[in-house]
Image: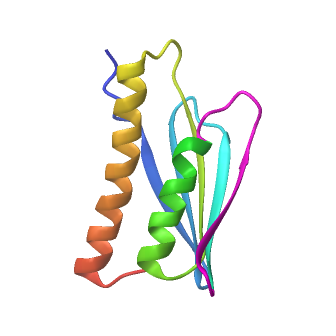
Amino acid sequence: MNSFDDIKLQVIPMGRDLLLTMTGGEAHIGAASTAYLTEQGIEVQTSALPGHKEHVLTAGLAKRAAEYYQRTVTVVMGIHYDGLNREEIQQISQITKSLLEQLLAESRTEGSL
């Protein structure tokens, strides 16, 4: 079983906005979601490449980060490992959520970003 310890989150400030990239295994661009504030709340727009499933994760992660930071956040993700089973996919989902929550917690304590 894979430990998925190569999954990483990178943060790139872009003026007031944030770009978050998540990669693991064979890195690539599978999906991108941008969450932004409107008068009605947070809106999310997502683009996914055919045959990729990362959009299932990027939309929620972008929304969570935009809500927390109160600014536009784009999450670009490309995680690929061959022959994953359902349990491993769930594990990857949890890892990506945990990485984002770690970032938010660090921002809270350090007052950064």
Which coloring applies here?
rainbow
- Displayed quadrant of residue 36: bottom right
| Picture quarter with the C terminus | bottom left
What residue is shown at x 77% (from left), y 32% (from top)?
50
* Magenta stretch bounds: 39-54
In this view, the residue in front, 54 or 18, is 54
**Is residue 50 covered in magenta?**
yes
In the image, farthest residue toward the right: 50
**Is residue 91 toward the left or the right of residue 58 in the image?**
left
Residue 21 lies, with reference to residue 31, above or below; the image says below
Going 35% across and 53% down the picture, which residue do you hit? 99
Q: Residue drawn 38% across and 58% down?
A: 100
Residue 106 appears at what percent x and percent y?
A: 28, 70
Q: Is residue 32 left or right of residue 105?
A: right
**At which x and y percent is residue 37?**
60, 80
Residue occupying image coordinates x 64% and y 57%: 33
On the image, the x and y values in percent for residue 95 come to: 35, 42
Q: Nearer the viewer, residue 82 or 46?
A: 46
Q: Extreme front residue here?
A: 40
Q: Total marks drawn?
A: 0
Task: Decide whether residue 49 is among the magenta residues.
Answer: yes
Q: Is residue 38 above or below residue 18?
A: below
The image quadrant that residue 90 belongs to is top left
On-image quarter of the N terminus: top left
Q: Position of residue 9 (x, y in %)?
A: 45, 53
